[in-house]
Image (tube, helix red, strand yellow):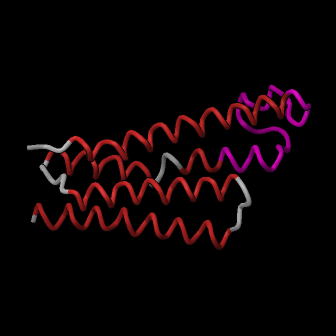
Amino acid sequence: MHNTQIFFPLVAMAFWTFAITLYMGRIRVRAVRNNEVKFSYFKLNQGSQVPERMSRVAQHYENLFEINSLFYIVVILMYTTQQTALLNILFAWAYFATRVVHSIIHLGSNNVKTRFLFFVLSLVFLVTLWIIFLARII
C-alpha cells in the first residue's frame, strides 16, 4: 500500500516556493515604487543596476527550481515504487526543513558560512533519499 504522507513535504516545498514567489513580487513592486529600478527593466531583466535585495531574492527563487527538482522527482519515484516508509518521509521532511532554513538565512542575514552549512545538510538529506531509492530498486 502507498503511503501518501510522502507527499506532504513535497507539497510544503511547493507552497514554500509560492511564498518566495510572492515575496519576490513584493520586493520588485517596492523597488519600482521607490524608483530604485525602472519598470522597463523587467522586459529582459537587464538594463540597469538593481537593488541588492532584489537581486538576492531573484537568485534564491531560481535556486528553488534547480536542486529541488531532484527532490520532487525522488519523492514521486519513491511513491510509485512503494518506498514510503517512515524513514523516507522523515528524510523528506528534513530536506524541506533545511531548505526553509537556507531560504531564511539567504533572504535575511545572508551569512554565507551558515547558509552553506544548511545547503550541504539539505544536500545530504537529498542524496540519502536517492541512495535509499536506488538501493531498493537494485
User: Could you tell me which quadrant the N terminus lies in?
Assistant: top left
Residue at 79% across, 32% down: 41
Compared with 46, 106 (above or below) is below
Q: Where is residue 51 in the image (x, y as percent from the top left)?
A: 83, 45
Q: Does the magenta stretch include residue 129?
A: no
> Which of 19 and 130 lies nearest the eye of the viewer?
19
Q: Position of residue 64 (x, y in %)?
A: 52, 48
User: Could you tell me which quadrant the C terminus lies in?
Assistant: bottom left
Rendering quarter of residue 133 = bottom left
Rendering quarter of residue 116 = bottom right
Q: Is residue 88 left or right of residue 64?
A: left
Compared with 114, 87 (above or below) is above
Q: Is residue 83 left or right of residue 35?
A: left
Q: What segment carries the magenta color?
A: 33-58
Rendering quarter of residue 22 = top right
Q: Is residue 34 magenta?
A: yes
Residue at 51% across, 41% down: 16
> Which of 83 and 37 lies nearest the eye of the viewer?
83
Single out the residue that lies furthest toward the right.
35
Q: Is residue 98 left or right of residue 45?
A: left
Residue at 31% across, 67% down: 128
Q: Where is residue 114 in the image (x, y as percent from the top left)?
A: 63, 70
> Which of 52 and 75 lies nearest the eye of the viewer?
75
Query: How many labels were placed on the picture?
Result: 0
Q: Where is residue 43 in the image (x, y as percent from the top left)?
A: 72, 28
Residue at 43% across, 66% down: 123
Compared with 76, 41 (above or below) is above
Q: Is residue 12 left or right of residue 31?
A: left
